[in-house]
Amino acid sequence: MYRPFSLFVGLRYTRAERRNHFISFISLISMLGIMLGIVALIVVLSVMNGFHKEIQERILGMAAHATLSAYASSGLADWQPLLEQVRADPRVEGAAPFVEIQAMLMQRGQTRASLLRGILPAEEDAVSALRADMIAGSMDDLEPGAFHIILGAELAAALGVTVGDQVTVVTPQVNVTPVGVMPRLKSFEVTGLFRIGMSEYDSGAGFMHMRDAAQLMRLGENHAGGIRLKFDDMFAAPRLAREIAYTLDQPYRVTDWTQVHRNFFAALRTEKRMMAIILSLIVAVAAFNIVSTMVMVVTDKRADIAVLRTLGASPSTIMAIFMVQGVTIGVAGTILGVIGGVLLGWNVEAIVAAIEQAFDVHFLDPSIYYISALPSDVRANDVIRVASAAFVMAVVATLYPAWRAARTDPVEALRYE
């Protein structure tokens, strides 16, 4: 006797030539449906991972993982010791001082609200990728006292300025003059343009030397608004920033990238989750096609079931035999789907590029979208979840047909044979 008996018979039934070829066709369709559903789910999740990773890298290329800033409006008067102290932590990859200003930029009748950041060019490379995103000019042109400014390419275009032009910066600070209270104005020369591919920065951000920003905000000449930090593990930034803050001599306001961009990244996670649920319905429909397939198989094998029962097979053995058949279809579809999905996910960018070149089309028009390629990031945990969900669906789909087979009455089954 072959052991386990139910597995042996179930696999024999799976390989055997059926009298009804339509059943074999439906079984093949069910397997292909599971395979295609898994391929679609893995590829879509991988592309969404790629987009999320690309956007995250662009945002964090400009935004620090965390910042330490003073509670006082006068900023940090003695920031150099603090900078050296946080740099001494082995988990900190980079740190740099900054001064941040909410301001209005005016030129040629155009006015734009913007976030201006005072930086030290020599220190900024430790926490941002601004230098790599420059499309005109250089960060090194930001010299103290020169009142130079670097603007996002879209912001410069909206103001109608380019390198060499002047823009007027209007800050919330005010001057008391004989004619009344006037906003604080200062003219800056545009010495550079940058483009990172995110409208939030390209159309609303600018950079100047930190000393010029401090002077503009009436801080001390050597004051900073805070310290920007970059960690070796950005996902641990909320915890690490607070751990470092607890070790400092005085309290500081702590913010991290998950707080600044909380709503945006939450929306991305929700989008991915809902897309996974919707596409899982494709796998569910294909998996539950196994129900109709197995019901027909049970009907086709009624005589065989009766013979096995008369030879001593228990109802649980009969149920296991037909569950083996249904699960085999599900496992085969799952394995093929995982292989196909992973291979397609790894090569989707090249495949899409080849299709665009062959048919002279653009799925993501560079003039409209910031990300014109189709990035893909295949993650093992996504593949495991998809494969596990498909396998569970296949198992669930076999329960009713197998239970029905186990309840077959041998006498009734053999009466008309």
Image (cartoon, rainbow, N blue to C red):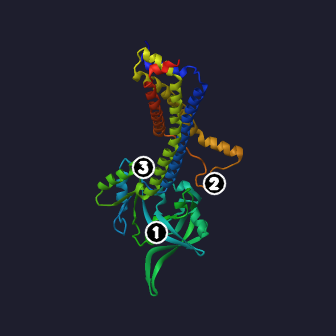
Residue occupying image coordinates x 50% and y 36%: 288
Q: Secondary structure at mark 2?
A: loop
User: Earlier along the polypeptide chain: callout 2 or callout 1?
Assistant: 1
Q: What residue does disc 1 label?
A: 102
Above or below, comparing residue 416 to residue 189 in the picture: above
Percent x, y for residue 307?
47, 16
User: Earlier along the polypeptide chain: callout 1 or callout 3?
Assistant: 1
Above or below, comparing residue 186 to residue 124 in the picture: below
Cα distance between the residues tagged 2 and 1: 31 Å
Residue occupying image coordinates x 46% and y 81%: 182
Q: Secondary structure at mark 3?
A: helix
Q: Which mark is residue 234?
A: 3
Above or below, comparing residue 122 to residue 187 in the picture: above
Q: Quick one: 29 or 113, which is closer to the camera?
A: 29
Can see residue 377? no
Q: Amino acid at mark 3?
A: Met
Quarter placement of the N terminus? top left
Percent x, y for residue 278?
51, 46
Percent x, y for residue 95?
41, 55
Q: Nearer the viewer, mark 2 or mark 1?
A: 2
Residue occupying image coordinates x 58% and y 32%: 29
> Badge 1 local density, few (<14 within 10 Å), some, or many (20+)?
some
Above or below, comparing residue 27 to residue 76 in the picture: above
Q: Which mark is residue 266?
A: none
Task: Locate residue 31 relative to residue 245 in the image: left or right.
Answer: right
Can see residue 117? yes
Q: Amino acid at mark 2?
A: Pro
Q: Amino acid at mark 1?
A: Gln
Q: Which mark is residue 366?
A: 2
Cα distance between the residues tagged 1 and 3: 26 Å
Q: Nearer the viewer, mark 2 or mark 3?
A: 2
